[in-house]
Structure formats: C-alpha cells, structure tokens
Amino acid sequence: MHSSKLNHHCYLLHHYLPLRDFLAGLTILAKFVLAIQLFGQSGFPWQAIIAVISIISILIGNLSALAQTNPKRMLAYSSVAQAGFLLIGVAVLGMEGLHFMLFYSTVFLLMNFLAFSVLHQYEESIEINSVTAFSGLGRLSFFPAFAILISMIALTGLPPTAGFTAKLLIFSSLWSTYQETQSTILLALFIIGLMNTVISLFFYLKIPYFLFMKESAQPAGTIKNSVARNLLHGILVVTLIYLFLQPGGLMGWINRITFVL
C-alpha cells in the first residue's frame, strides 16, 4: 500500500513539475514583454510575434493530439495547445489579459493534475495503451470515471467547469483588444482559437465516450481505490465546478498582482 502511494506521488510529480516550471517561465515572459513593449508603445511587433507563436502552438498541439490513441500522448500534445491558449493572455499586451492568463494557468494546473491522477489510478489496475482500454470501465467503477469525465470536460472548455470560464475570459480579452487595435493577426488568433476549441472535443471526449458508451471486450479487474485518492479527486472536481460558479474569489486575488519588475 505504501509503495503504491509513493509511486502515485512520484508519477504526479513527474508530470506536475515540468508544467509548474513552464507556467513560471510564462509569467517571466509576460513581465519581460510588458517591460519592453511598454503596453503597446514599443516599435517592435511583440504582439504579432507572440500571436503567431500562440497560433502555431494551438495548431500543432491540437492536430497532434487528434491523431493520438494513447491517452498519455494525447494529454501531452494537448498541453502544447493549452500553452498556446495561455499565450493569448500575453499577446493582448494588457494587465487584464495577464490576469486572465493567471486564472487560466491555475485552472489548467487543477484539471491537468486531476486527469493524470485518475489516469494513473486506472494504470495501476489495467494496461492503458489506447483509449479503447477504457471501454466499459465507467460501469465498473463510477467515481474515477466521473472524475476523469469532469477533467476532460474542463480541458475542452465546457460548462459547468472552470475550464469554460478560463477560455471565456481569455477570448473576451482577445476580442476586446482586437476591437481596439483592428489587428488582423489577433482576429486570426481568435478564429483559430475558437475552431481548435471545437476540434479538441474530438480527442478530449474520447475517453468518456469509451468509459460510458462502449462495452468492454473482455472482463476487467477491480479498479484500485482508496479513500485518500477519492477525496483528492473529489476536492479537485468540486473546485473546478465551484470556480465555474464563483470565479470572483480567485480573480480577486489575481487582480492584486501588478507584474511590476
């Protein structure tokens, strides 16, 4: 039991620490760009460059994830696309966009952590090399299936999860900046971002589809459960739904951040 918990913690740290470092680097980039750009006063086209990088990240990440059948690889490639969405907050070159980026970052950490934690829970019981391995497991053990369903809905950006709120805020900021600047590249980013949110439906919802809609080809064993793990997943699920219903509390803390160098 102790060894299983240790392996679970190591697994989550292996996926969490690089993501934490990336988000820290993204915050440093935001401060650097704002310092040089002076909120739109610099002659160098930082906004266009970051918008192009955002578009490339979103396209490469989503199209690569769409082609995957292995859930780990799918989540890894989709994280590249999520990085592109986070960069939208930098591309708008304003404090509001950066605050929305931080909200998105916080939500992304929660939903990604939940997804990998539940995935590892399944991997302790059965071999998961393809999304088809999830067939029928929603009936076998409901709570892990429900937890990963919420994580996939959140990663897609659908209600009633904070993933929807995060995407709504970041796209609202982008649209407002486009209306002010009439920048073609920002309009392209807005359209491509929306289109790729729709595309993400086709790979994020694969796992819930096989969990609940498909029958298992062969009898599956018992999915390992523990009170501590179910409690952790329950807290993350409730948090993601709560931040959809009441995002103001977190935004209140984030709005205090000034990004002063």
Image: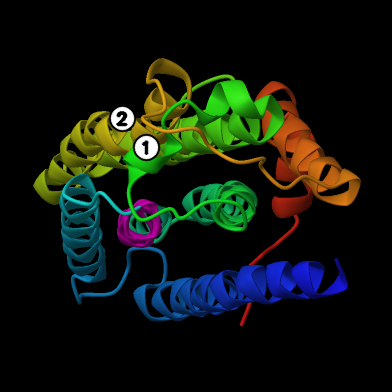
Residue 83, magenta (yes or no): yes
Q: Where does label 2 land, which residue?
A: 201
In the rendered image, which quarter is residue 189 located in?
A: top left
In the rendered image, which quarter contains the N terminus?
Answer: bottom right
Q: From what the image shows, is residue 61 above or below residue 141?
A: below
Q: Amino acid at mark 1?
A: Tyr
Q: How many marks?
A: 2
The residue lying at 56 percent from left, 38 percent from top is 151
Q: Position of residue 161 (x, y in %)?
A: 59, 28
Q: From what the image shows, is residue 231 above or below residue 18?
A: above
Tell me whether the residue at label 2 lies in contact with that at label 1, contact meaning CB atoms closer than 8 angstroms.
Answer: yes
Q: Position of residue 180 (x, y in %)?
A: 29, 39
The residue lying at 10 percent from left, 45 percent from top is 184
Magenta span: chief secondary structure? helix
The residue lying at 29 percent from left, 38 percent from top is 203
In the rendered image, which quarter contains the C terminus?
Answer: bottom right
Mark sitting on residue 76: none
> 129 or 85, which is in the foreground?
129
Q: Where does label 1 land, which residue?
A: 204
Question: In the figure, is residue 261 to the left or right of 69?
Answer: right
Q: Secondary structure at mark 2?
A: helix
Residue ranking furthest to the front: 219
Residue 83 in view (yes/no): yes
Residue 166, magenta (yes or no): no
Residue 165 in view (yes/no): no
Question: In the figure, is residue 84 to the left or right of 253?
Answer: left
The residue lying at 35 percent from left, 56 percent from top is 129
Q: Amino acid at mark 2?
A: Leu
| Range of magenta residues | 71-85
Q: Position of residue 17 (x, y in %)?
A: 60, 77
Few, some or many residues within 10 Å of mark 2 (<14, 14–19, 20+): some
As measured in the structure, the alpha-carbon distance from the residue carrying label 2 to the one carrying label 1 is 5 Å
